[in-house]
Image (tube, coloured by chain):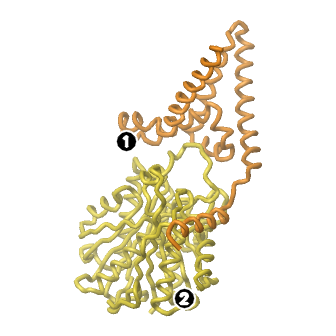
Amino acid sequence: MNKAERNEEYLEYVERQTPKTGWFNSLFHAFIVGGTICCLGQMFGDIIKAFNPTMDILRVGSWVNVIIITITILFTAFGFFDRIAKFGGAGTFIPISGFANSISSCAIEFKNEGLVFGIGSKMFFVAGPVLVNGVAYSIIVGLIYYICLLF
Amino acid sequence: MKRIGKYTLEVERGCYIIGKSSLVGDKEKGGTFKKYMKHFISDDRMGEKTFEKGERKMLEIIAKEAVKSSTLKLSEIDLFLGGDLTNQIVTTNYVAEKLAVPFVGIYSACSTITACLGVAGALIDAGGFTNILCTSISHFSSAERQYRYPLEFGNQRQSYSQWTVTAGGGFVISTRPSNIKITKVCFSKVQDYGVVDIANMGAAMAVAACDTLCNFFKDTKTKPDDYDLIATGDLGKLGSDILRDLMQKRKFTLGQNYADLGHSIYLFEEELYQGGSGAGCASSILATYIWEKMMDSTFKKVLIVATGALMSTTTNQQGDAIPSVAHLVELQRV
């Protein structure tokens, strides 16, 4: 048996042995945690709107983002955001809280390496790829949108 | 030193472990070997500013305590062999500077301790060395930031991942007779079966452990039942199940006397997944539980097969598979 065949056979065997994550549980947890975060966001928005009825809805949205980001960073700094995330998975990662956590956790972690080469260069260690992908995909979607508008 | 078969070496002159010490973190102390892990730390940073400095301080205590327990003085140590998981084994390098004894760094990932004991055995058998200090250490927080994500980053681990232990152990190997003797050494070939998933190190390392064990049994014409304990380093639950299967296929049955130290170090808790891993896993349990059980003669013949995954984050990101290694030492109660 050559090496490639041997490896293939072994990897198939490992695949069979490896425990799978239950998709129903993961989805349910993400639904509960993500849903709660979104409800909280809605609540903050409604409260702001109640106090400033004339405020533009986009402006309310920005304030909600600011509040959620601040809370996430505080939770990260006090060290219990990762516990919520461990339970919630994508439920905490997809809303803006995931983004805030990925940047703040890196900033905390690498502060010992200094302001420039620590925090400065490592802060986007996790969030960087997300940003780059986000920008790249939005360009693609924008192009498609533009082409569609031509016809 | 005599060669038996193709891979195994037999230590002919006496080569004894005369001193040991271990230091473990909070989580490890609360695990299965609670009764045996008497020396522990509750502050991961050891009062220092960074985890790396804390790890260094831990290792310094381990090294000095090991020498102290052997009733030797630091100046009587001829050579210091050791390694850890940080890049360039920098923790051990700094400690070696403080100890001021000749030092050779050995990196063999999580199998560092058996690599050190094996080399120490060979050097002592060759003559010219009387006392050799061997250590290995791993630290969850310094390893995690190097190999994975920042500590506070919220993500879900794979259910088959392992938890790097905060623990370390040190041993003094000498020509001076004591109760525990290094009798045989079997250095491992590096195996690569194409496992790329960095979370599934158990599967990557099981093949190396299987190869070394089979070579050793064939060379020495023994079988697993001849030993009181066969302990692999840190395969985790999944890895040790795979090893049992692989050994079974090669007609060696691992019975009740087989245990994986990584799988056993923590009590069953969901958040720790398949168990512990790390260079300190095998050394800390060897210096505590296995040591005491050998001292009271519960275990007379023990095989330690610490397993190591030899990847780096760079090669892993480039899509290369994880090469693995598993050095073996045979210890006997005399």
Within-10-Å neighbours for mark 1: few <14, some 14–19, many 20+: some
Q: Which quadrant, please, contains the N terminus of chain B?
A: bottom left
- Report which quarter residue B256 is drawn in: bottom right
Residue B29 can be seen, yes or no: no
Residue kind at label 2, given as amino acid type: Tyr
| In the foreground, B178 or B113 | B113
Q: Which mark is residue B227?
A: 2
Give the residue pinned by disc 1. Answer: A113
Chain appearing in yellow on the rendered image: B
Q: In the image, residue A2 lies at what x, y percent?
A: 50, 71
Say whether residue B285 is left or right of residue B54. Answer: right
Q: Residue at x 54, y 81 (%)?
A: B230
What hue represents chain A? orange
Q: Is there one chain holding both mark 1 and mark 2? A: no
Q: Secondary structure under badge 1?
A: helix
Extreme residue in the front direction? A151
Q: In the image, residue B222 lies at what x, y percent?
A: 52, 92
Within-10-Å neighbours for mark 2: few <14, some 14–19, many 20+: some
Q: In the image, residue B89 lies at what x, y percent?
A: 35, 60
